[in-house]
Amino acid sequence: MKNNIIAILAALLVFILVFRVYAVPVGPTVTYVSNTTMGNAGGTMVNETNNGSTSGIAGGYIFTINLDSNQKNEKWKAYVGNVTGKFALSDSSGYAIYDWTLTGSVTGEVYATRASGTISWGSTNCSNLTHIEAENTAMNHGGAQDNITATFDAQDNDEFEIAGRTIVASTCYTTNLYVDGAAPGDDSFEEVLLYDGTNFIYAAIIENDHDAYMNSNEPYDFQMIVAEDGRETWSSSTPYYFYVELD
């Protein structure tokens, strides 16, 4: 009896290990909804008199003014949306013998990478500064104010898992995307930088039906930003490959 119990426990352990090894992020079906961007504002008229009234002449005076400009950043692009899914027992052709559609709160991560090949999820971990600077170079992000390094400037991620492996809290370079037009105070919409030994990866933590970047009644499950080619002469679009891992 004791040997049978040991055998059962060993088999269960093997099952758990196999499940953790093969529970990797997968490419989702993507449904395009819309896109939007800010317009470029026209010139702002400046016409002052020497005393702020229509009766004073302006010639010969020096006027001190402060200018505040909100300019579109074409070195970055963003993706926002919702996540649905299911767990399935399927064959190589996609035919399922059974599946479990997820209802209620969906948890997990959304990943995006420029790499078109296979990602080594089992060896994926936090990006270090060398990886980030290499991506800055690859994407022509030379500006110190808004490059990848400046945007993901703190190692303060929450703990999460990739393919059964734990990413320890406060070890990955992280940023938090805005909620209702302002930086969140509760670490909502966290995004971290990862590396699999070859490829640079962005990871957005899924937030189920959370208030999003705009002040509206439409919640989203994820928000993420990814780098676009920063060259002034760039007139195309960099493709990214998306993956989803559901917990």
Image: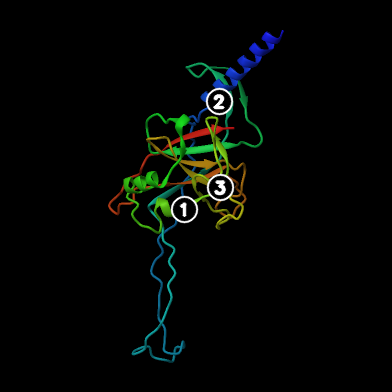
Mark in the foreground, 3 or 2: 2
Question: Of residues 220 and 201, which is closer to you in this image?
Answer: 201
- Identify the residue under disc 2: 20
- Identify the residue under disc 1: 153
Question: Of residues 107 and 155, which is closer to you in this image?
Answer: 155
User: Disc 1 on helix, strand or loop?
Assistant: loop
Residue name at image x 38 percent, y 58 percent: 144
The image shows residue 178, relative to residue 83, as above or below, that is below
Q: Position of residue 188 (x, y in %)?
A: 58, 49
Q: Quadrant of the N terminus?
A: top right
Q: Earlier in the sequence, mark 3 or mark 2?
A: 2
Residue name at image x 55 percent, y 52 percent: 213
Q: Position of residue 149 (x, y in %)?
A: 41, 52
Q: Residue lying farthest right? A: 1
Mark 3–mark 1 CB contact (< 8 Å): no
Residue name at image x 46 percent, y 34 percent: 124
Q: Amino acid at mark 1?
A: Asp
Q: Residue lying farthest front? A: 2
Q: Amino acid at mark 2?
A: Arg
User: Disc 2 on helix, strand or loop?
Assistant: helix
Q: CA distance from mark 1 to mark 2?
A: 31 Å
Q: Is residue 18 visible?
A: yes
Q: Is residue 98 visible?
A: no
Residue 98 relative to residue 115: left or right: right
- Identify the residue under disc 3: 189
